[in-house]
Image: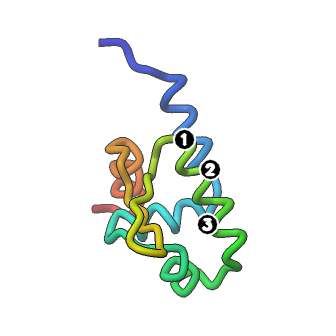
């Protein structure tokens, strides 16, 4: 089976920022919303939302509505594997 290098490149490009790596790392552990991510990373809400948009458009995460909040989770197994590799799991 041939590797889909273009798809891999899109994932790597989306992960190629320290804040996005930290976001995905946190979401591998547990899904959470923007407010929780903001508390963990200490970044402005608008910055986090921008990074979430990039990760979502790359197909790495998805959001699930819970009343007035959106909870995010990692849905791409390759991105999960990259995080686990980087963290030595």
Do tag 1 and tag 2 residues touch (Cβ < 8 Å)? yes
Where is mark 3, residue-wise?
Answer: 19
* Residue shown at the point (59%, 46%) measured from the top left: 14
Left or right of 56 in this view: 75: left
Q: x, y (%) of residue 54?
A: 62, 50
Q: Residue at x 62, y 63 (%)?
A: 18
Q: Do the residues bearing badges 3 and 1 touch, measured as CB atoms within 8 Å?
A: no
Q: Indicate the quadrant containing the C terminus: top left, top right, bottom left or bottom right.
A: bottom left
The answer to which quarter of the image holds residue 12 is: top right
* Residue in the foreground of this view, choosing between 85 and 39: 39
Q: Earlier in the sequence, mark 3 or mark 1?
A: 3
Asked whether 19 or 74 is in front, the reply is 74
Please determine whether, in this image, residue 63 is positioned above or below residue 19.
above
Give the residue displayed 47% in from the left and 42% down from the top.
59
Relative side of 48 to 1, left or right: right
Residue at mark 1: 58
Per the image, the residue denoted by label 2 is: 54
The crowd level at tag 3 (other Cα within 10 Å; few <14, some 14-19, many 20+) is some
Point out the tag, 2 or 3, that comes first from the N-terminus. 3
Say which element carries label 1: loop
Q: Residue 42's x, y, as percent?
A: 63, 85
Classify 14 as above or below 9. Answer: below
As helix, strand or loop, the secondary structure at mark 3 comes to helix
Label 3 to label 1: alpha-carbon separation: 15 Å
User: Going by the image, does 67 lie left or right of 1?
Assistant: right
Image coordinates of residue 47 in percent, x first then y, are 71, 69
Residue lying at the far top of the rendered structure: 1
Report how far apart the C-alphas of labels 1 and 2 lie in the structure: 6 Å
In 3D space, how far apart are the residues under numbered discs 2 and 3 (Cα atoms)?
12 Å
State the residue in front, 40 or 56.
56
């Amino acid at each position: 089976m041939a590797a889909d290098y273009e798809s891999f490149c899109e994932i790597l490009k989306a992960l190629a920022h320290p804040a996005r790596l930290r976001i995905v790392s946190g979401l591998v552990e547990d899904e959470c919303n923007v407010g929780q991510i903001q508390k963990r990373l200490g970044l402005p809400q608008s910055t986090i939302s921008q990074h979430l948009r990039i990760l979502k458009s790359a197909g790495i995460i998805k959001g699930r509505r819970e009343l007035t909040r959106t909870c995010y989770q990692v849905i791409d197994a390759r991105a999960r594997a990259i995080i686990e590799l980087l963290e030595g799991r």
